Amino acid sequence: MSEKKHILSILVDNEPGVLSRIAGLFSGRGYNIESLSVAPTNDPAVSRVTMVTVADEDIMEQIKKQLHKLINVITVHDLTGANFIQRELALIKVNAKSDNREEILRIVNIFRYKIVDVAPDSFIIQATAKGDKLDAFIKLLTPMGIKEIVKTGSIALYRGN
Amino acid sequence: MKLTGAQILMKVFEEEGVDTIFGYPGGAVLDIYDALDRTEINHVLVRHEQGAVHAADGYARAANKTGVCLVTSGPGATNTVTGIASAYMDSIPMVIITGQVSSHLIGNDAFQEVDIVGITRPCTKHNYLVKDIHKLASVLREAFYLARSGRPGPVLVDIPKDVSNLTTTYEKPQVGSKIEMRSYKPTYKPNIKQVQKIVSLLKKAKKPIIFSGGGAIHSGAAEALTEFARKTKIPVTSSLMGLGAFPGTDPLWLGMLGMHGTYRANLAVSTCDLMIAIGVRFDDRVTGKTDVFAKNATIVQIDIDPTSIHKNIPVAVPIVGDCRMALEELNSLIDNENIDDLCNERDAWFAQIEEWKNTKPLAYEQGEAIKPQYVIDKFFELTKGEAIVTTEVGQNQMWAAQYYHFNKPNHFITSGGLGCMGFGLPAAIGAQMACPDKIVADIAGDGSIQMNIQEMATAVQYGLPVKIIILNNRYLGMVRQWQELFYKRRYASTTLDHNPDFVKLAEAFGALGLRATKPEDVEKVLKEGLASPKTVIMEFITDREENVYPMVPAGKAITDMLLV
Ligand SMILES: Cc1ncc(C[n+]2csc(CCOP(=O)(O)OP(=O)(O)O)c2C)c(N)n1
């Protein structure tokens, strides 16, 4: 059976140890986590975990059921195939010398990203997008010399209701 | 009312109807023990914390209640892990209370500090570290609720020493108040439409079979299962964990399924056109090679745990819910049907099963040396099938499952999922505490019994007339059997030439020790052991290289049986 990428949106009790239960479930059963992002929701007692995982259909069904079986997990939604918005945030520190500063600014403008820090020989760019668009952007910047990158995992929400 | 944490624990025990707990004291639980000493609760002092957990397991199964253990921090807590893992795999309701170092020391590598919540996360249904005395009562109530509801399992509560010592107000819960957890809502009531599908499937089936497991026992479905099978004339097989849910002496009983299942059960499963699976999880010891398992059958699976469904075997009709409720529902649906429509053309199916039964029944020939099967046969006969039987692990366990025909649920107590040697003796202690008037026997191997032999002292201390039947083959028999069959008889580290003298050992513990070396002594020793009011070891020197058959080599189809 073919493997597919899935985005899971999981609401959990905001309690110590919950993340370790989820991570332990994945490592213990040999499932993989491609990215993970966690923060409290507007209800401080509840956190949202957004997780990207790759699995075939049977394993995916198990993953969802096993997650649901964890006592601290309130709901599990597989957004894959649904109508949803997905974003990742990246901060990219890139070499910016006099000969390429203009070029960098031009690329950043095309993508409508932002320069959030300016130093004598580097910029930090803030980029928000879906994963593949970010990859394209990073590719364009690579020749300039990327010093460091930090990326969040995907976060996602259903559109409308 | 202001109470200490330790006293609150006692109050919750009282609320939950706990009358017996198994444990071992230490620094971090001194306050708890001090409070416990002033209650009416029986405390059984084991000799090793692993024993406490297995005893609570045996108690839980025999009494059909939640087992409770109490141990100290650090080594006390780590010693429980094997027992907890076994209870988790067998879905046994249990609450384990561990002491922890004081809150302000946690994380400092304090003396006897261990992160037991971290260690047991993957082998408990849930666990808690209680840092706030105000939450103690609610966490404990939640722990008991989780342990026994839905798919049961062990729940651990780690209580730092200062929390057992601090005080807070204790309030009795309101009568009839229920625990509500937004993130935990087990489904008990099965979807009626799904249950109705079974009725239509029965109308078409010519070769149906019921396969029941531990879930049928845990949910108290034995009666409903028996009624259903008898009404619709469907033969029944079960996993190791399911023995006793359907009477082992009923003509519809096929024997156990799987690696050491009967010839007819394994063939019937491979031939059936409809399988109704009840409270099973299709463990690899049952299915063998999964892609040919029950390959001709439409499979219906009833289970309270959705993760058990469709995990190892694809299922046509999944039913999430309580096995007993589903079967009762089914029985009432059937009452509205013409019963003959539901048991169409069964004659050919029964004839086929009868033929399998006669070709390769479970059998052995009692020769010069004592056959282990003969000991169990005789024991079954002498106890009229009424005993509660616990087992160790290995050949002894499989022979117990094959030759003691369990007619009632909660009478066969074995470490099924984990297969944990050293389980039987402490489990028998727990079962005997739960059922003082029953005959409780541990069917053991000479290897396994030495894993928790120290619990002899516990059995003797509490005057428990547990019967320990050692089938002594001077080998780690089951491993030797694999070496004989698959490793060219190289018996690497499986010979036990330096066993203790079990009769003297029994006497040293203050128990009765008996030994049979010849077949003609078997009955005499059993009778004498059964008649004694003491803890008793009955040692049977058995035919050394006797094997358990049938045997399906690991990973093979269950039709690929090695037979005697
Ligand atoms: C704690 C533990 N360690 C190792 C094993 C592996 N094992 C399974 S059966 C067995 C041999 C058991 O020997 P014995 O208790 O003498 O029983 P027999 O098979 O001879 O009846 C062993 C070592 C196990 N199941 N549990």
Image (tube, rainbow, N blue to C red):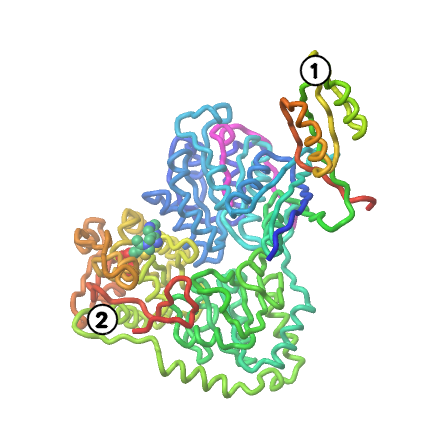
The residue under label 1 is: A97
Residue drawn at x 28%, y 70% as measured from the top left: B373
**Magenta-tinted stretch:** B155-178
The residue under label 2 is: B523
Residue drawn at x 73%, y 25% as measured from the top left: A126
Q: Are marks 2 and 1 on the same chain?
A: no
> Can you say whether B412 is above or below B128 in the image?
below
Picture coordinates of residue B52, whole percent (x, y):
38, 46
Residue drawn at x 58%, y 50% as measured from the top left: A66
Picture coordinates of residue B307, whole percent (x, y):
58, 55
Residue B159 vs residue B253, the one in the foreground: B253
Picture coordinates of residue B58, whole percent (x, y):
41, 55
| Secondary element type, mark 2 | helix
Residue B187 vs residue A131, the one in the foreground: A131
**Which image quarter has ligand 1?**
bottom left
- The label nearer to you, 2 versus 1, is 1
Q: Sort mark 2 into few (<14), some (14-19) or many (20+) by Cα contacts within 10 Å.
A: some
Q: Sort mark 1 into few (<14), some (14-19) or many (20+) by Cα contacts within 10 Å.
A: some
Q: Chain of mark 1?
A: A
The quarter holding residue B249 reads bottom left
